[in-house]
Every structure is written in structure tokens, then in C-alpha cells.
Amino acid sequence: MVNGHAKLGEIDIARGLFVEMPEMDVISCNAMMARYVQNGYLMESLKNFHDMLSKELFLDNATLLITLSAIAQLGHFDEGVALHCYIEDNGFSLSEKLGVALIDTYAKCGSIDNALSVFEDIDNKSIDHWNAILSGLAIHGLGEVAFELFMEMEKLFVKPNDITFIGVLNACNHAGLVKEGLMCFELMKRVDKVEPKLQHYVCMVDILGQAGHVEETKKFVEKMSIEPNDVVWRTLLSACRNHENFTIGEPVAKHLISVDSYNLSSYVLLSNIYAGFGIWNDVHRIRMMMKQRDLKKIPGCSQIELEGNVHKFFVRDKSHPQVREIYSMLDSLSTLNSEVGYCKH
């Protein structure tokens, strides 16, 4: 019943049933924690975990996997370290899913060094361990390290899969490694016989586009073995905007708008292209189209953890209780940046 109600999004009913249970065990706790995570109640899932510890309930691999997922999404580094210690002290093996989850958690909590340390200490690495560390290196922009690790995989005859190539191509993308990205893409098709999916094509379009090879990127899209979707075209459009290529950018944007007239990003990118070339009549026309279709941009959000509390910040939002101190500090940092020669464009 707890599991069923929570799966339907009725988290309060599920919580009520869970609390009323005469006796809690690892199965019921895991069910409640998993559904908390599924519905975004990450702190509640962690609280359940700590309740299990305080009541000295038996914890199994599923408990630890669910908890690591919550920690990774929250970015709670200290909780990750504490759980890692618990895993080691209680003799849990990292050779399977638990090791993969721990690598992923450390990477998402900002400690790629800890993630690499865990990876290196695992003797019988599966492809999932390799994939986890490659994705972690991509998150941290360490393309060179990821590429070297991928080449080590090839030397060790570890068979990569499609997820492996998403990780290494993303890493090459974040580090601007065009040559290495093209090499990996060719190895995927010709040597490892992995059929490229849309995610791989998006990575390659972004790699080429960000490097300024807009003409080459367009040709790459046109030669794709599968039909390019809106993400592929939008990635090409973003490259056109960044490198001021009006000739390719305008028809791509118009195509995207004709395919999906309610996707805001296509309008914004096209408007920025027109603005970059000073075509203000078209900028005004695009903005009027956005207004008529009631297209509104979702505000950007950042979050940080401080002393166990997660603080969220939205664009132009001044609801934080310490907003005065925050803006005062930002002004001070801006002044310091100007003094050392940083110029905001």
C-alpha cells in the first residue's frame, strides 16, 4: 500500500500508512525511501535512513543505493563520506552496483578525486564502473583524463557500450577536444561496432559547433544515419548564434519553429542571432511572436549546500532571508574582479 500510493504521487497518504505500521523493517523502509527519492523528497529519504541507523535496523544494498541516489541529487558531500565509511566498516562490496553508485555520488558532490580513488580501488571493474567514472570526469570538464582512461579501456580490451561513448564524448565536449572526440566517434562505429544514437550525434554536433566549425557541423548533421531531432538542430543553432553564422542559423531556426512552434529556446536563439547582426525589426517580430504564443522562459536556478542546508537561488529572486548580505558580497567580488582586470561583456 505504501509503495502503491507513493507510485501514484500520493506521498502524504503513503507516509501516513508508513508511520502507522506496527513494525518497520528494511523492506518497508526501502519502499518509503525509494518513493521519497522518486517524488523529489530527498531530505525525507535521508531522514528515514538516519532513523534506520538510530533504530539499528538491518541495512541492505538497496538501502545504501537509494541513500546514495538521494545524496548525489542533493550534493551532500559530507553525507557521502559518512556513508562510504559505513560501507567499508560493514564489509559491503563495491564490485557491483554499490561501487558504481558511490563513484557517481562523489562525482556529483564535487569530489572527482574521491570518485577516482574509489574507482582505482575496485579490483573487478565492470563496464558500469568505467561508465560512472567517465561520466564523472565529463561533469568536471576533465576531458583529457577521460580520453586517456577510455584509451586504457581499449588497451585492456574492456568492451565499451553506448553509455561509455556518451560519457567520453561529453568529456571531450566539455574540454573542447575536437580531434579526440572525432577519434572516439570513429572508434565507436568502426572498431567497437556500437551504432551511434541521437545522444552521440548531439555530443558530436556540440563538439564541432562549440569549436566554431559551423559549416562542418551542418554537413555532419546532414549526413547522419538517423533523422536528426529538434535537439540536434537546436545544438547546431546554438553554435550559429555563438559564432555569428547568420546564413546557416536563420533557416535552421525557422525550421525548428515550424516543427515545434511552442519551444521557447528556438525563438530566443533566433532573436539573439538577429540582435547580433543588428536586425532589430526581426528581433521585435520574434519577441511579438513569443508574446502572442504566451511563451515564457523558465528562470535559471542554482543551489548550494552550507552546513547541511540546501539553498536555492533563482534569477532575479530576492526571497532569501540573507539577500542583502549576498548582494553586498557580490558587489564586493565584482569590484575585486574589476581591479584585477576582469571585464564583463
Image (cartoon, helix red, strand yellow):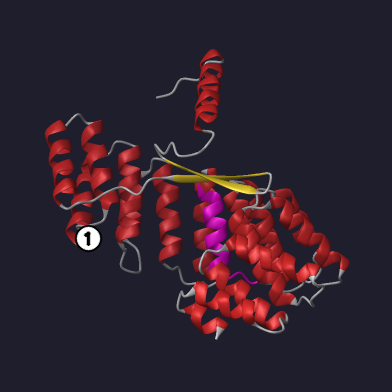
Taking depth in this image into account, of 162 and 105 the one nearest to the observer is 105
Residue at screen point 73% across, 74% down: 96
Residue drawn at the location 64% of the way across and 72% of the way down: 159
The x and y percentages for residue 121 are 82, 61
Residue 199 part of the magenta segment: no
Q: Quadrant of residue 158?
A: bottom right
Question: Going by the image, does 10 lie left or right of 277?
Answer: right
x and y percent of residue 30 in the render?
66, 77
Task: For residue 191, say whether it is visible.
Answer: no
Tell me where residue 10 appears, x and y as whole percent: 47, 75
User: Could you tell me what secondary structure mostly forms the magenta stretch?
Assistant: helix
The kind of residue on which mark 1 rests is: Asp
Q: Is residue 186 above or below residue 288?
A: below
Q: Residues within 10 Å of mark 1 (few under 14, many from 20)?
A: few
Residue drawn at x 56%, y 15% is 340
Write down the residue under mark 1.
Answer: 260
Of 19 and 141, the residue lying toward us: 19
Q: Kindly tell me whether residue 241 is visible in this rendering.
A: yes
Nearest to the observer: residue 160 or residue 271 = 271
The quadrant where residue 345 appears: top left
| Along the viewing direction, whichever of 211 and 312 lies nearer the viewer | 312
For the record, the magenta segment spans 159-173
